[in-house]
Amino acid sequence: LDPASHYLLATIQQEQGHGGAAAQSLKRALYLDPEFVLAHFALGNLCLSQGRHRDAERHFGNALALLQVRPHGEILPESEGLTAGRLIEIIMSVQLSLLRGHKESA
């Protein structure tokens, strides 16, 4: 019942090339803690790596919505020192890249 354990398991599964299992573990983490920002971010990255851009954008949007109400200097749990503000910057950069990719393919 520990969302951090499911997040860690997902990280291991993804490193082993088991994207489907990693996605399931991240979904379990989010079921247990819908505000687990890093799980939303990781699921967005996983979807992005699978070419599922719309799903990735949704997960990144969820993470941003949760991050907007946190102090930018707050260190996120399970992040090894990553702050809310820095993760916002990372997500916005990824979203900008996605937007540019959509424009180039249009």
Image: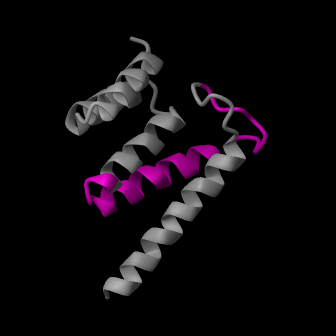
- Tell me, yes or no, if residue 69 can be seen here: no
Q: Quadrant of residue 9?
A: top left
Quarter of the image where the C terminus is located: bottom left
Residue 1 drawn at (x, y percent): 39, 11
Residue 38 drawn at (x, y percent): 51, 36
Image vertical order of residue 43 relative to residue 24, above or below: below
Q: Is residue 84 left or right of residue 106?
A: right
Give the extent of the magenta segment. 49-77
- Tell me, yes or no, if residue 80 can be seen here: yes
- Tell which of 20 and 1 is nearer to you: 20
Residue placed furthest toward the bottom? 106
Q: Is residue 65 left or right of residue 16?
A: right
Is 27 part of what is drawn in magenta? Answer: no
Q: Residue at x 59, y 31 (%)?
A: 79
- Tell which of 60 and 90 is nearer to you: 90
Q: Is residue 20 left or right of residue 25?
A: left
Residue 49 drawn at (x, y percent): 32, 53
Residue placed furthest toward the front? 16
Q: Quadrant of residue 13?
A: top left
Q: Residue at x 36, y 25 (%)?
A: 12
